[in-house]
Image (cartoon, helix red, strand yellow):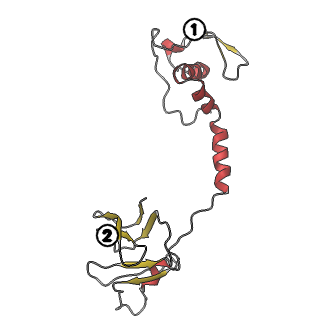
């Protein structure tokens, strides 16, 4: 199956370093491959490149000459490697959301809407249909207390239509001393994931 082959290799020239030398053994070692002849034409990978599907064994031999046997071995275990990766993904357990259900406080909460509640705990209740909303002014903050010191390597914020253009993520082990681990001044809403060490 040649799906996904974006382009065939061009001729490298008869004097190219590491030319394909004919005859050669096939990848599995079971056959001897010589230059392919169709009609009155004999095809040489060095001067014709990958001119057609019949030149695939020559192309693989060229890869072996340029990249080495290890590259060819990896090429031929690609499907098996994919299947091993796929099988491994079935056992994958995503990391737990440390913030879900944690205690949350905020600088303010939007209060004027009688139909919805925008309390800070709505930001971490696990329901994408609820949210925290601050009053309409700058320098607002949301604080999430994880209960004890835990390693945090990323924070994901799922904004609604309103979003902060500039904001930062700060961490603290004692609730008093804060360290900025990530910030932006080009926020554009949507789903933001801040990654840090």
User: Which of the two discs, 2 and 1, sits closer to the camera?
Assistant: 2
C-alpha span from label 2 to label 1 = 66 Å
Q: Quadrant of residue 189?
A: bottom left
Q: Which mark is residue 42?
A: 1
SS for tag 1? Answer: strand
Residue 71 drawn at (x, y percent): 57, 29
Residue appearing at x 43%, y 73% in the figure: 173
| Horizontal side of residue 6 vs 61, given as left or right | left
Residue nearer the viewer, 81 or 175: 175
- Neighbour tally class for label 1: few under 14, some 14-19, many 20 plus, Cα within 10 Å: few
SS for tag 2? Answer: strand
- Neighbour tally class for label 2: few under 14, some 14-19, many 20 plus, Cα within 10 Å: some
For the N terminus, the image quarter is top right
Q: Which mark is residue 167?
A: 2
Residue appearing at x 50%, y 70% in the figure: 150
Quick check: 107 above or below 186? below
Q: Earlier in the sequence, mark 2 or mark 1?
A: 1
Q: Kindly give the residue lying farthest to the top in the view shown.
A: 40
Residue appearing at x 34%, y 74% in the figure: 162
Residue nearer the viewer, 69 or 131: 69
Q: Kindly give the residue lying farthest to the left in the view shown.
A: 138
| Horizontal side of residue 14 vs 74, given as left or right | left
Quick check: 146 above or below 40? below
């Amino acid at each position: 199956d040649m799906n996904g082959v974006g382009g065939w290799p061009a001729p490298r020239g008869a004097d190219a370093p590491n030319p394909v030398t004919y005859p050669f053994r096939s990848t599995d070692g079971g056959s001897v491959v010589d230059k392919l002849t169709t009609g009155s034409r004999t095809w040489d990978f060095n001067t014709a490149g990958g001119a057609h599907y019949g030149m695939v064994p020559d192309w693989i031999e060229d890869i072996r000459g340029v990249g080495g046997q290890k590259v060819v071995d990896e090429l031929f275990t690609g499907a098996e490697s994919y299947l091993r990766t796929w099988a491994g993904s079935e056992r994958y357990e995503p990391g737990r959301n440390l913030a879900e259900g944690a205690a949350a406080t905020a600088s303010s909460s939007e209060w004027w809407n009688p139909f919805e509640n925008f309390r800070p705990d709505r930001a971490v209740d696990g329901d994408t249909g609820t949210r925290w909303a601050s009053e309409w002014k700058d320098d607002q903050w949301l604080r999430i207390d994880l209960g004890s010191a835990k390693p945090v390597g990323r924070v994901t914020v799922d904004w609604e239509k309103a979003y902060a253009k500039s904001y930062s993520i700060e961490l603290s082990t004692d609730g008093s001393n804060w360290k900025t681990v990530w910030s932006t001044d080009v926020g554009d809403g949507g789903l933001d994931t801040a990654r840090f060490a």
